[in-house]
């Protein structure tokens, strides 16, 4: 749908939304809220300094921890059993950036967006980059899509894309990924994420070796198109949409393919892409040890790839993952800076509220992991003092770090309570007034 995008008009509208948010403390946060926060923060800061834990470095790390928002998760997701809109959904890429701009103004930790192609092909690159800049947003990894047949596509991906026995289908999928890299280059992105639905639903349907060999050769073809400072993230998943085998089913297969491609290829860990009870924190530590962990798709799940709010089901598991990340970021210089992204789908919650809660959960869990006394833990591990090892981890996990996360936000000129501010400002009502009730966001 071609939307006549008059930037100056747009700036006005965004200005209106954002000015309401930019300086919330003056607008919204009542003195009681601020004094409560200051009291709780001072109390925690004193407690931590008694443990010789400096607060400033923690606040700096929290403020610097920017998570990319998935462009495909700003509308109501839906399942095969139904989709319930939340109204006021972003109907254009510009409106999606606006929503991410609101999230970033409210949290100051959502300073990037991850686009999915062809759902988000920019029509006006100059205007889009200007808008992103105005919203203080960067373009993180771009995502290719060879799990749906694009309109007018010559070859179908029904039986696979990079692994398809049809050379034409493989070539078409390779060309699409190269086009996605070009789109990313025009936007200033520095990485592409490749997730393949490729797999089979019945025994005998696939020759596993042929499918893997085609995929390997196709990825190596795509790899050749990467710019000098670009990265290729290979995302694995055990099942869905196919239910017997998936070509890139687990971290080992992704790592093997990344090694085959070269030093600019890495494994991407989507938290929902693991069979029940998988020890994801051990996968993370192994990939960092090998210098091959590229990034994350944060979400949570109870059963399958549920893509629900981060930390809403398994907060301790997320803490153990962040504990390995903190250890790895301090001890594995061989692993590059990580790409932090959320990958979610919203069926019941307002997408922006859900993302605010996910961002909060990521900050809280990172803060708890930063409190782990890694040196003391190492000692206890050396001496096989198993009980003490658990005590050291849980001491950090059971610390209420919310005053720390709030202080990092306040210092970044964001509201003390983003969700409350979002509601107090009636942002959803504003968006519905502006966009109406029939807009549908592209994506999942
Ligand atoms: C696959 C996945 C992948 C995206 C898609 C939207 O389940 O996690 O990261 O391309 O969701
Ligand atoms: Mn994902």
Image (tube, rainbow, N blue to C red):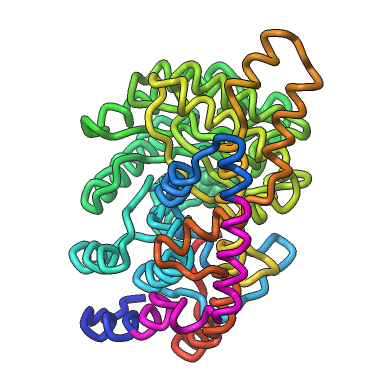
Q: Which quadrant of the structure image shows residue 216?
A: top left
**Left/right of residue 286 with respect to residue 238 in the rendered view:** left
Where residue 40 appears, as percent x and y from the top left, is 63, 60
| Residue 152 located within the stretch drawn in magenta | no
Q: Which quadrant of the structure image shows residue 179?
A: top left
- Looking at the rendering, in which quadrant would you find the C terminus? bottom right
Magenta stretch secondary structure, dominant: helix
Where residue 11 appears, as percent x and y from the top left, is 27, 80
Q: Residue at x 62, y 25 (%)?
A: 206
User: Could you say which is closer to the camera, residue 349 or residue 103?
Assistant: 103
Farthest residue in the left direction? 126
| Residue 25 located within the stretch drawn in magenta | yes
Q: Residue at x 33, y 26 (%)?
A: 264
**Left/right of residue 196 with respect to residue 387 in the rendered view:** left
Relative height, residue 84 to residue 359 (above, below): below
Residue 333 visible in the current orientation: yes
- The magenta stretch is 16-44
User: Could you say which is closer to the camera, residue 363 or residue 26?
Assistant: 26
Residue 345 visible in the current orientation: no
Where residue 321 appears, as percent x and y from the top left, is 62, 34
Farthest residue in the bottom direction? 433
* Location of ligand 2 given as a quarter of the image: top right
- Looking at the rendering, in which quadrant would you find the N terminus? bottom left
């Amino acid at each position: 749908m071609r939307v006549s995008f008059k930037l100056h008009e747009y700036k006005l509208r965004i200005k209106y939304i954002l000015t309401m948010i930019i300086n919330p403390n003056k607008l919204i946060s009542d003195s009681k809220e601020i004094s409560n926060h200051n009291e709780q923060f001072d109390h925690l800061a004193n407690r931590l300094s008694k443990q010789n834990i400096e607060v400033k470095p923690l606040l700096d790390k929290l403020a610097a921890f920017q998570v990319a928002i998935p462009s495909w998760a700003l509308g109501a997701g839906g399942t095969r059993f139904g989709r319930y809109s939340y109204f006021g959904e972003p109907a254009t890429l510009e409106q999606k950036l606006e929503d991410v701009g609101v999230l970033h103004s409210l949290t100051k930790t959502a300073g990037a967006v991850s686009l999915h192609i062809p759902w988000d092909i920019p029509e006006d690159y100059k205007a889009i980059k200007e808008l992103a800049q105005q919203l203080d947003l960067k373009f993180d990894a771009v995502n290719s899509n060879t799990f749906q047949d694009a309109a007018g596509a010559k070859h179908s991906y029904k039986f696979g894309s990079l692994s398809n026995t049809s050379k034409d289908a493989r070539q078409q999928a390779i060309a699409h990924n190269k086009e996605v890299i070009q789109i990313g280059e025009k936007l200033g992105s520095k990485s592409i994420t490749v997730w393949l639905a490729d797999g089979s639903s019945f025994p005998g349907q696939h020759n596993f070796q042929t499918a893997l060999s085609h995929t390997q050769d196709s990825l190596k073809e795509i790899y050749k198109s990467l710019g000098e400072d670009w990265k290729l993230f290979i995302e694995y998943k055990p099942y869905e949409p196919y239910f017997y085998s998936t070509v890139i089913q687990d971290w080992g297969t992704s790592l093997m393919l990344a090694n085959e491609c070269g030093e600019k290829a890495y494994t991407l860990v989507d938290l929902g892409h693991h069979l029940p009870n998988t020890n994801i924190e051990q996968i993370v530590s192994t990939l960092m040890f090998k210098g091959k962990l590229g990034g994350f798709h944060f979400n949570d799940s109870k059963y399958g790839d549920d893509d629900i709010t981060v930390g809403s089901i398994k907060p301790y598991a997320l803490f153990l993952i962040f504990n390995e990340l903190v250890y790895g970021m301090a001890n594995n210089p061989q692993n590059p800076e990580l790409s932090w992204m959320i990958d979610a789908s919203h069926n019941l919650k307002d997408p922006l509220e859900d993302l605010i809660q996910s961002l909060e959960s990521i900050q809280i869990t990172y803060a708890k992991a930063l409190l782990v006394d890694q040196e003391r833990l190492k000692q206890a591990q050396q001496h096989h003092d198993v009980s003490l090892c658990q005590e050291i981890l849980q001491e950090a996990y059971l610390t209420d770090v919310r005053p720390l996360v709030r202080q990092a936000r306040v210092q970044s000129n964001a509201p003390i309570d983003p969700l409350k501010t979002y509601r107090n400002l009636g942002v959803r009502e504003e968006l519905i007034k502006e966009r109406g009730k029939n807009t549908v966001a592209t994506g999942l």
